[in-house]
Each structure stands twice: as structure tokens, then as C-alpha cells.
Image (spheres, coloured by chain):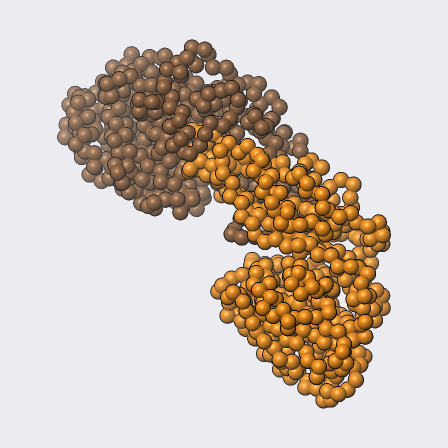
Chain colours: A orange, B brown
């Protein structure tokens, strides 16, 4: 439970970013202690056994927010995990006419498995070499606390906030934010804002080292479980081999045709809606100093993909198609001479700006059914569908955020895309008409979703400072 | 452990087939109880976790044989599972100059997976509708017991055996009989015989119903575990999708090219050594009254394979290629957006007379390595390699066995090939110069290698009777 949040001494003081930043500098240990409290709650959203802990996570966040003088609600829809919602009113803000930021983040975490990969237990936060190790340290508790601590830096120095803030901190991001759209619909009035800020992405890691970044585009996602059923039971491959359709043979035959030898997807019309990258934007990417050798070398890979494109172009602006899993027949050690009853694959597509996940889903299903599978039967289950996201890279809000980062770091942020997907961004656009600013402080090496997840304390502090400056700049926005 | 094997009353009685058959008829329940004891031992040879149970299986068989008055040895080579060997001496045989049958069978079984497909647990034998359900009920414990019970029918009726018998009951058939050739070499003197009898095949299922059969040709086998390794760890498909080689994509791409759309294997030279079926033999097959509609309909399949061939031709005289299993990446429920570190497949080939498994193994490995896999690395493990088998269909021993079957069933057996593989048959020919008589009592519907494997008790009884008659006919052979 949060304690000693330094109750404000004078709520009528004018906003002073320098005072807020000075507080953040002086109060670093305390900030780490607060984050560690939150990290010690095992709020694993995917496992029903942890539902109580997820609730505890929401309650901790709500109490923290209330200690800042705001009212916090925990709401849920359709039996989902709680969402913490809080809104400043005019009394919290130095200039009540200032714009409103909706800050979105999540307090739930991935399962800690495999447990034996952790140096210290995943829910007993531990500082080593200037890094805080715990499940959720970066994704996303650490990044949520950057923003909340930025708010606290005003409160603790006796100041009102420079702009309005709405907080939307959910507990189902790691399971696909399934019930969040319903919460957005239910609370559509309460959630009106001028801009959404999300801190669940990474810094730009160029050849000159990491630098804060604003991510202005994300790829969307379409995910399938593709199962092919053949004979009514597993068969002996000696008695039946060569005389009937083996679903494992035919699944690989069909999947093998999904991309050509040039690594392009063969589904008719697949590339029709893929937007070209404007020349100016492509030139901008060149200047980012992308370190391809490190990016791929860190994971033991070499460049491989569509011909005539750079790795960054492939990752940010082109669709991808990945088999995420294969299963069926004999999967154990050694040999079993079986013709399996069924075989399956997890297949997903990342789709860049302008592609329509619903259209692709239909194209994919139609394409699958064009193949002769010798009487076998398809079962295609779709898991998730997320629109790609692209916000104008030259908007006034991007300029505002850039100014804030420039103020703290001394140089402008990198403007980047990312290949990953944050489904809620599209929902916020769709339901609330909100564009999002993605300002994150993660690194590829933070081991999010893996054992020994961590967050560098210098980046935690940097994140707090940047968000404090963003609040100040937002107060001057427009 | 075998119990109450009805100790003989008079070892000097003359051999009397009718007395033996009468005993088999009267003692059916006891025979089922003995087989059930053996079936309750989970002697799964492919999984090291079951090694102790495999040993128990060998010990049970050895004790059973010793209860018939023979000495039984359990021997092994190169750390393999034990082989049970026993030989009659002159004192066991009514006419010490009679020929010697070497009976080969196996007490090991396939894994019972998938466990949830079984109506009753695989190692708790259960009789339903006149069928005995358990892993190994047919393949091959039930069929081994047909022969052993035939021997017991002479012993139990106070008779010596009509001919010499050597028993060779191994524990590695389901993993390719890897160490058996070494045992054959080590014991080459002890294993000399006039003919080998194997009971691990099926009856002929023509349009007139099942009839006992002598199988004179088998396909060989080459089996691979094919694993493709990519990045050094599982990766997030949003951050890395489309920029590096996904081993699951590339495994399916390569496997997808292994056969063309006409269902012919594309490995160069693959069909070079496949022998044509002599016209006379092909005509003989036509007369067998093969019921394709039932054969395929029973397993919910339709004909599918190389163009221009009948199902029987595909099954008996053509090579086949089957993916027996697929694994890697996320195999659970729902979605996980991972680029897997590796993906794998079990791939096997059945090869008809004249193909060379060693040559094919090399061709396959060479072919795999011709593909661009974007820096991923293959790990190809071979599990088993067996020559195809063809024995003369008109030999004196086939006539002897036919006479025995005629005696019991009232009509001659069908002479057939089979698509399956019994690796040891080629080894017995190679190392001991022995031809084999394949006389089996399985049906295609016995679900061998599948859940709910079973053996009809009427066929178990028929098998016991036929082998009792074979022993009698063998005593008169030559």
C-alpha cells in the first residue's frame, strides 16, 4: 500500500516544472520503493488462480491515485478484471481550460514462467547493477509509474497539475484487452480527452545508443488457429501410407504455399492496400542510424524477408506472416509411425497502416479453402483482430511531446514506427476519436515476457522527468 | 506373472492336434486372463521413462516360457531393451528330427498417446463386445500369445511339441529393432532354424469378410526427426515479424515441397529403384476382392495418392511419405504471438521391394539441405531404417502353412503383400539366411498405434488354433 506520499503544502502554487523535476531527482529512492510495492503484487491476468492478486493490483493503483487527491474508481465489464479510472476536476489543475491527456497503461503482467529462469523471484523486486528486476518492471508497471510519479512530483511540491489528466489503467492488456472496449463504451462521456498518452513502448536504439522516442505507427494483427482434420482416428502409416490424405502432409503443403520463395505472401490481393512509405518518411528513417547488425545479431539471426527492402522497412511498413506454432501427430521423443487424425498451426499476420484486418481474415480463409486437401476438413478459429495504427507524425501534439522530451534530454526524440500491436490504441481511436502519443522507455533487452524482466533505474527516472515535462508542455498546448 | 499353466501330466504322449485344439477351446478364458496380465505391463519402448516396465514385460514372457518347461534367457546388446530367447531341445519334441521353427514377435508397444482417446485406460485390459481393449492387444502381445498358447496347448495336454521351436521375443520393434541385429550376430549359432514364423500382420479383408492370410512382401521404412533452429530465443512476432527467418515458416515451406500436387515425392531419383509389379501378380491381386470402399470408409477417408494407380497398388507396391508429427512454438489453447526458436517434424517413408533405405536416407538429407532457410540450422535425426521384404510366394513352407490354415479354417489362406514394415524380417534373412512366414490375425480396424487398440477374442482363439495346427504340420514338413 502506498504510504507517505508527501501531502501537498500549498495547492494554489503556480506550476513550476523545475520544482517538480527537482523533487523527482531528490526522491528517486522513494519512487523505486513505491514501484517495488506494486511489483510485489503478482497480478497475472491470464491465470484465473491469480484473480485475487489482479484485484489487489487495481486496489493499489487506486489508493495511489487517491493519495494524489483524485477520486479513483475501479470498474469492470462482462466479468473482466478491474479497470482503474480517475479524472482531474478543475480544482486539480492550475489552468482549468488546459487540455486533457488520457493516460492509458496496464497493471497486469505476463505469467512469470519459466520460473527457473529467474535469478531472484519474479515478485520479489531486486535491484542489481542499477536495474530493478521483477515481472512487470518494464511491461508495464514501471512505465505506468513513470507517469504517476510525474503527477506526484507536482503534488509533492505543492502544485496543481499543468493540464487535465484522465487515468485509464487496465488489468487485461496481456490477455488482449477483451473487456476494455465495453468499458470504453460504458464510460464514453467520462473518457473524453484531447489526446491519449501511452507508455508501453520502447526507446529508439540507434547506433548512438538509446534515445527517447515517440512511436507514431503500429502494425495491426490477425491471428488464426488453423486445424486440418483427416481420418477418423490416428492410423498406422504402413497400412495407410500413400492411399489417403494425411492432414499433416497437407497442412504443410498448404502452409508451404502461403509465402513464395521471395518471402511474399501469395494470397491474392494481399498487398493491394499496403501503403507506400512517403519518400520523406523513408529518408527520415535512414537518418535514425538503425543498427541492424546489433538488432538481428542479438538474437542470432540474419536479414531475411521481402526482397529490395531494408530491415526497418520490413519491420515498420510491410505486412508479415508468421507460423507461431505447429502441433499434431506424434510430438514426443523418438519415432511413432502414425498418420495423425489432425494437424494444426497457429498463423498470424502483422499488418501495416491501411490494411484491414477483417478483409485479410476473409481473404485468408478463402485462400485456405482453394486447396485440394483430399477430403480433409478445415477448422479455422480466429483469435484477435487489431487494426493498424498511424497518427500524423507532424501533428501539434507530437510537437508538444517532442518539446517536452527536448527540454529533459537536450535533443528531440526519435520519431519511429513499431512492428508490434497495441489493440487498445485502435479502440481509443474508434470509440473515443482519440489519437495516441506512444512515449516509452523500454529497451529490447529488458526481457519483457521472459525471465529476469527488468527496468533500468536511470530509464525509470528519465521516464518520470519526461512525463513531468509533458504535463507542463500540455498545459501550454494549443 | 503367469500362474497355473496346467503342468503336463505325461510328457511322453504322442502329438495329437485334436487334443491340443480341444484344450484351446476349453481354456479360452484362461488364455484371455494370461494375455491380460501381459497387457497390463506398459512396455513402451520409445520412452526412456518406461524402461523398467519394458524389463518387466521381458521378465513376464520369460517366466511364461519357463512354465512350459523351456529355459528362457533375456539378453541384450548395446544397452538395448531385453530380448527373450528360448529353444526346445530334443526332450521337448516328439520327433527330435523334426524341423525347427524360429518364432519372432515383440512384447514392446507403441506409446498410448493421446490418452484422452481411450474409453478405458490403455494398460487396464477390458473386454467389451467380445473384444479385448488395451495397448498391444493386437500389436503384438496378442499375436505373440497366439503362438505361445499354441505351444501351451500341447504342454497342457501332456504332449511333446510336434516340431522344434526357437522363440525370439524382442522389446524394440516399435523403435526400429535397433539393437536386435547385434543380438542375432552374437547368437547366430543358437538361432539357426529352418523357417521363421512371424505373427505381427493382418488377415485379408476382402469383400467376403476376413480370412487368414500369409503375407509374402512388406515395405521398408526410413524415419526422420527433422528440426529447424532459428533465432537464439523465442521472439515477439511484432518486433521481429518479417525481418528474419522464422523456422516454423521455413519448415512448412520445405515440407510443403516434399511432394508435388500429384502426390509424388519430389526428391531427385526417389522413384528410380521402385520395382514394377509383375503382370501375373497384379492379376492375382485383382482376384482378392479388395473392398476399397470399406477399407477407406472405415476410417472416414477417400482415395488420395499417386495418379493412375489403385489403392492396393499404392499400399503394397509404391513408396509413401508421411509427416507423422509436427511440433514447435505455441501449441496451447488460444494465441501467443511468438516466433519460435525452433520447429520440428517427424517424417517417414515406406519403401517397396527394391528400394534401398540407406540410399533414400542420404537422398532425403541432401534434398533438405538444398533449400534456403535464411540462416536457420537443420538438425536431422534418423530413427530406424528397414529394408523392404519379399519372400517366394510358392515355397514348400508356404504350402505347409497353407495346409495348417486350411485344416483349421476349411479354406486356403489369402496370399498378400502388406504396406507396413517388420524390420527384423530383413535382418533374419541377412544374418541367418531365414525366410519368414508372416501369418497374422489382425484387422485394419484393430486401432493398432491408436487409442482403443483391441483384438477380437474370436481371432485370438483362431490364431491359437492356427498356430497349433502349424506346429503339427511343421512336424510333418519335408
Whether residue A202 is visible here, answered yes or no, is: yes
> Residue A296 at what x, y percent from top left?
73, 49
Residue closest to the eye, A19 or B272:
A19
Residue in view at x 34 percent, y 22 percent:
B206
| Location of the N terminus of chain A (image quadrant) | bottom right
Q: Quadrant of residue B114?
A: top left
Looking at the image, the residue that sits furthest to the front is A189
- Vertical relation: A185 (above or below) B401: below
Residue B236, visible in the rendered structure: no
> In the image, B179: left or right of B58?
right
Task: Decide if residue B451 is on the left or right side of residue A230.
Answer: left
Which residue sits at x=83%, y=71%? A407
Image coordinates of residue B288 in percent, x first then y, are 36, 18
The outermost residue toward the bottom is A9
Q: How many marks?
A: 0
Along the line of sight, the residue nearer the viewer: B301 or A34 = B301
Is B49 placed above or below B386 here?
Answer: below
User: What residue is at 39 percent from the left and 44 percent from the top?
Assistant: B117
Q: Quadrant of residue B279?
A: top left
Could you say where residue A64 lies in the image, as x and y percent from the top left?
A: 63, 78
Q: Looking at the picture, how far across and down is residue A243, in whole percent?
A: 47, 27
Quarter placement of the C terminus of chain A:
bottom right
In front here: B313 or B145?
B313
Q: Residue at x 52, y 65 (%)?
A: A78
Amino acid at each position: 500500500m502506498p504510504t507517505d506520499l508527501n501531502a501537498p503544502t500549498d495547492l494554489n502554487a503556480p506550476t513550476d516544472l523545475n520544482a517538480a523535476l527537482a523533487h523527482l531527482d531528490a526522491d528517486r529512492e522513494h519512487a523505486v520503493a513505491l514501484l517495488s510495492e506494486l511489483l510485489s503484487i503478482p497480478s497475472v491476468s491470464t491465470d484465473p488462480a491469480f484473480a485475487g492478486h489482479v484485484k489487489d493490483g487495481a486496489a493499489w493503483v487506486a489508493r495511489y491515485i487517491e493519495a494524489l487527491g483524485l477520486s479513483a474508481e475501479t470498474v469492470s465489464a462482462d466479468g473482466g478484471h478491474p479497470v482503474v479510472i480517475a479524472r482531474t476536476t478543475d480544482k486539480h489543475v492550475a489552468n482549468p481550460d488546459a487540455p486533457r491527456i488520457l493516460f492509458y497503461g496496464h497493471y497486469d503482467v505476463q505469467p512469470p514462467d519459466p520460473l527457473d529462469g529467474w535469478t531472484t523471484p519474479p515478485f520479489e523486486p531486486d535491484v542489481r547493477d542499477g536495474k530493478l528486476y521483477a515481472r512487470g518492471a518494464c511491461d508495464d508497471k514501471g512505465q505506468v509509474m513513470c507517469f504517476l510519479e510525474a503527477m506526484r512530483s507536482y503534488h509533492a511540491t505543492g502544485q496543481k497539475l499543468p493540464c487535465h489528466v484522465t487515468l485509464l489503467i487496465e488489468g487485461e492488456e496481456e490477455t488482449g484487452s477483451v473487456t476494455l472496449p465495453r468499458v470504453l463504451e460504458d464510460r464514453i462521456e467520462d473518457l473524453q480527452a484531447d489526446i491519449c498518452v501511452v507508455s508501453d513502448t520502447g526507446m529508439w536504439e540507434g547506433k548512438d545508443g538509446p534515445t527517447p522516442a515517440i512511436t507514431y505507427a503500429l502494425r495491426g494483427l490477425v491471428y488464426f488457429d488453423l486445424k486440418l482434420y483427416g481420418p477418423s482416428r490416428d492410423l498406422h502409416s504402413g497400412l495407410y501410407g500413400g492411399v489417403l490424405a494425411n492432414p499433416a502432409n497437407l497442412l504443410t503443403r498448404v502452409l508451404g504455399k502461403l509465402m513464395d520463395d521471395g518471402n511474399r505472401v501469395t494470397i491474392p490481393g494481399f498487398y493491394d492496400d499496403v501503403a507506400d512509405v512517403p519518400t520523406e518518411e523513408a529518408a527520415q528513417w535512414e537518418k535514425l542510424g538503425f543498427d541492424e547488425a546489433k538488432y538481428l545479431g542479438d538474437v542470432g539471426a540474419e536479414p531475411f524477408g521481402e526482397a529490395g527492402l531494408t530491415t526497418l522497412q520490413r519491420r515498420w511498413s510491410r505486412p508479415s506472416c508468421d507460423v507461431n506454432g505447429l502441433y499434431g501427430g506424434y510430438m514426443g521423443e523418438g519415432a511413432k509411425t502414425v498418420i495423425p487424425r489432425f494437424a494444426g498451426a497457429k498463423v498470424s499476420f502483422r499488418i501495416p497502416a491501411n490494411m484491414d484486418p477483417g478483409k485479410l481474415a476473409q481473404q485468408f480463409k478463402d485462400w485456405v479453402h482453394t486447396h485440394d486437401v483430399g477430403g480433409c476438413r478445415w477448422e479455422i478459429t480466429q483469435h484477435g483482430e487489431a487494426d493498424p495504427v498511424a497518427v500524423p507524425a507532424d501533428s501539434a501534439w507530437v510537437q508538444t511531446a517532442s518539446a517536452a522530451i527536448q527540454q529533459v534530454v537536450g535533443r528531440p526524440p526519435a520519431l519511429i514506427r513499431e512492428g508490434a500491436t497495441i489493440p487498445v490504441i485502435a479502440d481509443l481511436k474508434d470509440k473515443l476519436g482519440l489519437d495516441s502519443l506512444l512515449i516509452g522507455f523500454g529497451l529490447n533487452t529488458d526481457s519483457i515476457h521472459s525471465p529476469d524482466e527488468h527496468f533500468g533505474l536511470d530509464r525509470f527516472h528519465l521516464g518520470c522527468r519526461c512525463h513531468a515535462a509533458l504535463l507542463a508542455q500540455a498545459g501550454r498546448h494549443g
